[in-house]
Image (cartoon, helix red, strand yellow):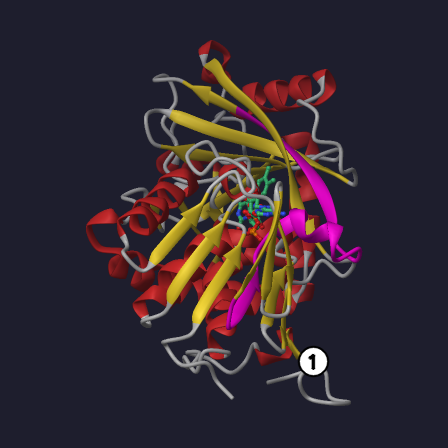
């Protein structure tokens, strides 16, 4: 039976999925208790560390066709959802595409990227434009002029993830339908949330587990995949869109942010170490950045960061329905790309129709005996 809007719902984890789900459910008339282990304003979620790229094509190369399709669907939903957030919506959401480049000596890497892309998504030439050196300079005059070729992935976008997280937090704080429990680490079970310090159990009609890597204590199949980033600030370089640098040893991305800031990342390390960025990573990121646009030399490093992306072994997201509990996790390195679609799938348990039925295979309904997959 679908829950009614009088049902009392708990959400564990106020990261990306937790905040989005709380917002969408209160719009549908539900009352929410939202639990967060850490600070809400100074969140340590992966959502705060992310670069905010919405890049279905670039991600297809390292994931698979379903992630690509889900990303395309989310790209349709994001503008509608940001509009629905109204005055609180982040202003930094841009659809200028993204640029993929390689230094002249590494042009084979660019060809490899294109071949991988074609293998996963087919020859979708209408979404990929080949640029000459002159066209690159016209689009991004501050890039190193030695780039001879680039790919422009026209349908890709980026948003300021921190602005979005703040917008959703403002919504949650102002909503009479949401009670926020900050610095409250919880375990979850069917119909129950257990605060761990001090122990206290509360009952709900529904519990939604959005704890990201934090759910690993109860879901051993989850793992964290470490990512490291540098944040620099400069008035010397003006990039309009994310740029990916294909390199034989690492692939660097740089994403423009408000206030002349850029976030640079590359490393994806199979480790659950949450210690600060290593010297080697910081050297590699800085030197790659300098070769991308030498004017970055005078930029200031204003932040370094490292965090864990929540992933299952197959690196695919998963939504699980069971009696009194829903789990949504495994958004890995494309949480922003997938979040609206995954949130829609979660909301189908509450009788809210999804705008596409293509992604139901990502839902595992344990309430149906012998038929785990599909709602
Ligand atoms: C360096 C880096 C760069 C990235 N770049 C991008 C990008 O460009 N584009 C993109 O689409 N994705 C990107 N991602 C991935 C994206 O950030 C994640 O996929 C996404 O944040 C996952 O969302 P989530 O809500 O599942 O988890 P999170 O955002 O991590 O939120 C989980 C929340 O649960 C809380 N929590 C944990 N345990 C408990 C507990 N026991 N009780 C209560 N609360 C708990 C945590 O404190 C946290 O606030 C990046 C990630 C990293 C690390």
- Tell me if 279 is positioned left or right of 212 in this view: right
Residue lying furthest top: 298
Above or below: residue 286 compared with residue 160: above
Around disc 1, counting alpha carbons within 10 Å, would you say few (fewer than 14), some (14 to 19), or many (20 or more)? some
**Residue 161 is a magenta residue:** no
Q: Position of residue 108 (x, y in %)?
A: 71, 42
Under 8 Å from ligand 1: the CB of mark 1?
A: no
In this figure, which residue is indicated by the disc labeled 1?
A: 366
Q: Position of residue 366 (x, y in %)?
A: 69, 80
Above or below: residue 157 compared with residue 254: below
Foreground residue among 270 and 184 = 184
- Residue at 62%, 18% (x, y): give it: 287
Q: Quadrant of residue 176?
A: bottom left
- Residue at 62%, 78% (x, y): give it: 323
Above or below: residue 190 compared with residue 307: below
Foreground residue among 13 and 309 = 13
Quadrant of the rendering where the C terminus is positioned:
bottom right
- Residue at 44%, 61% (x, y): give it: 21
- Tell me if 198 is positioned left or right of 42 in this view: right
What stretch of residues is rendered in magenta? 204-230
Foreground residue among 253 and 175 = 175
**Residue 206 is a magenta residue:** yes
Q: Position of residue 313 (x, y in %)?
A: 79, 58
Give the secondary structure at mark 1. loop
Q: Position of residue 213 (x, y in %)?
A: 67, 48
Q: Quadrant of residue 225?
A: top right
Is residue 72 at all visible to an observer of this figure?
Answer: no
Is residue 177 at all visible to an observer of this figure?
Answer: yes
């Amino acid at each position: 039976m679908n829950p009614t809007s009088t049902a009392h719902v708990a959400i564990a984890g106020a990261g990306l999925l937790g905040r989005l789900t709380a917002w969408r459910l209160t719009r549908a008339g539900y009352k929410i208790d939202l639990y967060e282990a850490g600070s809400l304003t100074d969140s340590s979620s992966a959502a705060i560390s992310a670069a905010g790229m919405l890049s279905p094509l670039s991600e297809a190369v390292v994931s698979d066709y379903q992630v690509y399709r889900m990303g395309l669907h989310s790209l349709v939903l994001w503008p509608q959802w940001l509009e629905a957030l109204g005055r609180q919506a982040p202003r930094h959401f841009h659809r200028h595409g993204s640029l993929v480049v390689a230094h002249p000596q590494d042009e084979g890497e660019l060809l490899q990227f294109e071949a991988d892309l074609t293998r996963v998504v087919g020859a979708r030439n209408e979404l990929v434009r080949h640029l000459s050196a002159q066209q690159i300079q016209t689009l991004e005059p501050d890039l190193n002029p030695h780039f001879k070729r680039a790919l422009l992935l026209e349908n890709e976008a980026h948003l300021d993830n921190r602005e979005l997280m703040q917008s959703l937090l403002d919504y949650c704080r102002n909503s009479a339908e949401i009670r926020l429990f900050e610095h409250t680490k919880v375990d979850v079970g069917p119909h129950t949330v257990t605060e761990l310090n001090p122990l206290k159990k509360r009952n709900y009609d529904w519990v939604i587990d959005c704890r990201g890597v934090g759910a690993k204590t109860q879901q051993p199949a989850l793992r964290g995949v470490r990512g490291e980033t540098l944040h620099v600030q400069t008035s010397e370089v003006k990039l309009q869109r994310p740029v990916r640098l294909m390199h034989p040893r690492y692939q660097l991305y740089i994403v423009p942010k408000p206030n002349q800031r850029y976030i640079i990342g590359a490393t994806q390390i199979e480790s659950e170490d949450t210690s600060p960025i290593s010297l080697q990573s910081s050297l590699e990121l800085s030197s790659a950045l300098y070769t991308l646009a030498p004017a970055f030399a005078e930029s200031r490093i204003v932040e370094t960061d490292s965090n864990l992306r929540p992933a299952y072994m197959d690196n695919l997201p998963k939504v699980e329905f069971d009696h009194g509990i829903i789990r949504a996790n495994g958004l890995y390195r494309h949480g922003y790309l997938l979040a609206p679609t995954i949130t829609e799938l979660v909301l189908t348990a509450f009788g809210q129709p999804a705008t596409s039925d293509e992604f139901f295979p990502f839902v595992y309904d344990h309430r149906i005996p012998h038929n785990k997959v599909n709602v």
